[in-house]
């Protein structure tokens, strides 16, 4: 996996207790991070002291990756408001199983990274592993990498709403058996688990949900 991260005024969003910040579902899979890319951008009108502070954080992030034996590349983003050029640049950084942490640094760079992820995912749904943000409390929030042009079928939309409602009401994700039973009750119809699993996979490919395996059960986590 490749870990792409933006850096600004601190690196608390990258490392916690000596470990790399990751979404829980990815962390549970014991991922192997094969490379890292640190991105930063400093405003031209900033003070020398502020620039030194940013560069110090960038160097610290670089050293922390190296201490974990993760090869790392540092890239300064010049002229970040050239939106289309930056998007094309970021698309080239995204390889299969890329994780993107857009917490730090300038917002425009994070927006461009997210948009680049959407475009890459449209071409190959399996390339983007996760795009996420780390809160001040250290919680990880994953972003849905969804193309607004993609429309859901009526059944896909119904399944998504059932998953969302269950997560909101119970505070936990729904497993496939629960989803099938709920759908059968609502529609007064019969569905096989492979049928339900295929529709969930469609939603996952479109960026609306993620599957998680716990023991023998598969759970569905809504991303929106």
Image (cartoon, rainbow, N blue to C red):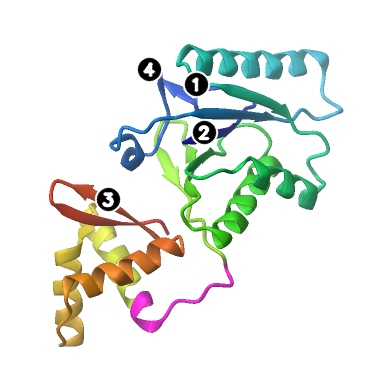
The residue at the point 64 percent across, 40 percent down is: 93
Which element carries disc 2, helix, strand or loop?
Answer: strand
Residue found at the far bottom of this picture:
188
In the image, which residues are magenta?
A: 148-157
Marks 3 and 1, how far apart in space?
26 Å
Which element carries disc 3, helix, strand or loop?
Answer: strand
Q: Is residue 199 above or below residue 213?
A: below
Residue at label 4? 17
Q: Position of residue 110 (x, y in %)?
A: 63, 42
Residue at label 2? 3
Nearer to us: label 4 or label 1: 1
Nearer to us: label 3 or label 4: 3
The residue at the point 28 percent across, 65 percent down is: 163
- Of the residues under marks 3 and 1, which one precedes in the sequence? 1
Q: Are marks 1 and 2 in contact (CB under 8 Å)?
A: yes
Residue found at the far right of this picture:
45
Mark seen at residue 6: none
Residue at label 1? 70
Which element carries disc 1, helix, strand or loop?
Answer: loop
Nearer to us: label 4 or label 2: 2
Q: On the picture, is 61 further left or further right than 134?
A: right
Crowd rating for badge 3 (residues with CA inside 10 Å; few <14, some 14–19, many 20+): some
Q: On the picture, is 108 further left or further right than 181?
A: right
Marks 1 and 2, how far apart in space?
10 Å
Residue at label 3? 212
Crowd rating for badge 4 (residues with CA inside 10 Å; few <14, some 14–19, many 20+): few
């Amino acid at each position: 996996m490749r870990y792409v991260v933006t850096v600004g005024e601190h690196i608390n969003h990258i490392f916690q207790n000596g470990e790399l910040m990751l979404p829980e579902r990815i962390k549970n899979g014991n991922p192997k991070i094969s490379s890292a890319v640190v991105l930063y951008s400093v405003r031209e009108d900033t003070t020398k002291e502020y620039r030194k502070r940013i560069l110090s954080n960038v160097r610290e992030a670089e050293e922390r990756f190296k201490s974990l034996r993760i090869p790392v590349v540092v890239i300064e983003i010049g002229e970040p408001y050239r939106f289309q050029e930056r998007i094309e640049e970021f698309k080239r950084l995204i390889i299969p199983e890329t994780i993107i942490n857009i917490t730090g640094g300038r917002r425009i760079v994070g927006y461009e990274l997210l948009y680049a992820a959407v475009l890459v995912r449209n071409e190959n749904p399996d390339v983007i592993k996760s795009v996420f943000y780390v809160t001040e409390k250290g919680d990880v929030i994953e972003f849905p990498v969804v193309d607004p042009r993609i429309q859901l079928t009526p059944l896909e939309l119904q399944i998504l709403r059932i998953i969302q409602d269950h997560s909101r009401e119970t505070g936990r994700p729904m497993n496939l058996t629960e989803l099938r039973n709920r759908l059968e009750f609502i529609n007064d119809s019969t569905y096989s688990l492979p049928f339900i699993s295929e529709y969930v996979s469609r939603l996952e490919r479109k960026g609306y949900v993620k599957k998680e395996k716990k023991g023998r059960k598969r759970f569905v986590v809504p991303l929106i």
